[in-house]
Image: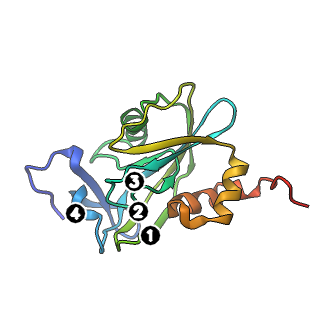
């Protein structure tokens, strides 16, 4: 698919074939629907120096999973933008955070999920972790609420009510082995 020449690179996502190779670009607004094309994205899980992870609640005007709790932030790299540059750009834009110790932890994470409205996410989505020293300053167009949580507490919540979180957070947490943490109070 070729994008409209009047669309800026900031509004484009990178389309992928089933093998993960780039096959073109498309306007971001056109790829999140009931028949979403496979495209490139990323997720980042931010930790503070106390080892807590930052959860965010997606803004209510988000097209996919509005108001749902998720990992710290996600996004799409622009065409020809290195994914790591997009990670830093989105951290600043969505949460006002400067990241350090950024690490790629799930380079091949891929998922397809359908939200309650029928909107589909279909992404190859490398997953990163990062450390921050500051408190988030959420952009209200992106994030309506934030909360620092202990990873073991997050694992308990994800087990008890996976429907209350974004599907990618549930899947990433499983693959990042946060469920391997001992459950407090378990016999």
Element on which disc 4 rests: helix
Which residue occupies the foreground of this view, 25 or 176? Answer: 176
**Is 8 displayed left or right of 105 in the figure?**
left
Judging by the rendered image, the residue that carries numbered circle 2 is 123
Which residue occupies the foreground of this view, 116 or 50? Answer: 116
**Is 90 displayed left or right of 163 in the figure?**
left
Judging by the rendered image, the residue that carries numbered circle 4 is 30
Element on which disc 2 rests: strand
Judging by the rendered image, the residue that carries numbered circle 1 is 112
Q: Tags 2 and 1 in contact by the CB under 8 Å rule?
A: yes
Dot 2 or dot 4: first in sequence order is 4
Q: What residue is drawn where x is 69% and y is 32%?
A: 50
**Please, which residue is most extreme toward the left here?**
6
Colouring scheme applied when the structure was drawn: rainbow
Q: Tags 2 and 4 in contact by the CB under 8 Å rule?
A: no
Judging by the rendered image, the residue that carries numbered circle 3 is 41
Residue 109: in sight, yes or no?
no
Dot 1 or dot 4: first in sequence order is 4
Q: Which of marks 2 and 4 is in front?
A: 4
Dot 4 or dot 3: first in sequence order is 4
Q: What residue is drawn where x is 51% and y is 41%?
A: 146
Q: Tags 3 and 2 in contact by the CB under 8 Å rule?
A: yes
Work out how far the residue at label 2 is from the one at label 1, CA to CA, in angstroms.
7 Å
Dot 3 or dot 2: first in sequence order is 3
Q: Which of marks 4 and 3 is in front?
A: 4
Element on which disc 1 rests: strand
Q: Where is residue 65 in the image (x, y as percent from the top left)?
A: 41, 61
Quadrant of the frame with the N terminus: bottom left
């Amino acid at each position: 698919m070729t994008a409209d020449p009047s669309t800026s690179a900031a509004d484009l996502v990178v389309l992928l074939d089933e093998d993960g190779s780039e096959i073109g670009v498309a306007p971001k607004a056109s790829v999140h629907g009931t028949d979403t094309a496979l495209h490139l994205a990323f997720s980042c899980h931010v930790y503070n120096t106390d080892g807590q992870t930052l959860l965010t609640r997606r803004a209510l005007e988000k097209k996919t999973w509005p108001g749902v709790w998720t990992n710290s932030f996600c996004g799409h790299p622009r065409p020809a933008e290195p994914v790591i540059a997009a990670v830093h750009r989105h951290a600043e834009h969505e949460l006002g955070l400067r990241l350090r110790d950024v690490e790629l932890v799930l380079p091949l994470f891929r998922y397809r999920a359908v939200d309650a409205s029928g909107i589909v996410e279909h992404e190859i989505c490398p997953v990163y972790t990062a450390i921050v020293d500051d408190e988030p300053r959420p952009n209200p167009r992106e994030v309506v609420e934030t909360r620092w949580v202990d990873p073991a507490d997050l694992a308990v919540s994800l087990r008890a009510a996976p429907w209350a979180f974004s599907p990618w957070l549930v899947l990433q947490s499983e693959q990042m082995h946060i469920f391997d943490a001992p459950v407090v109070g378990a016999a």
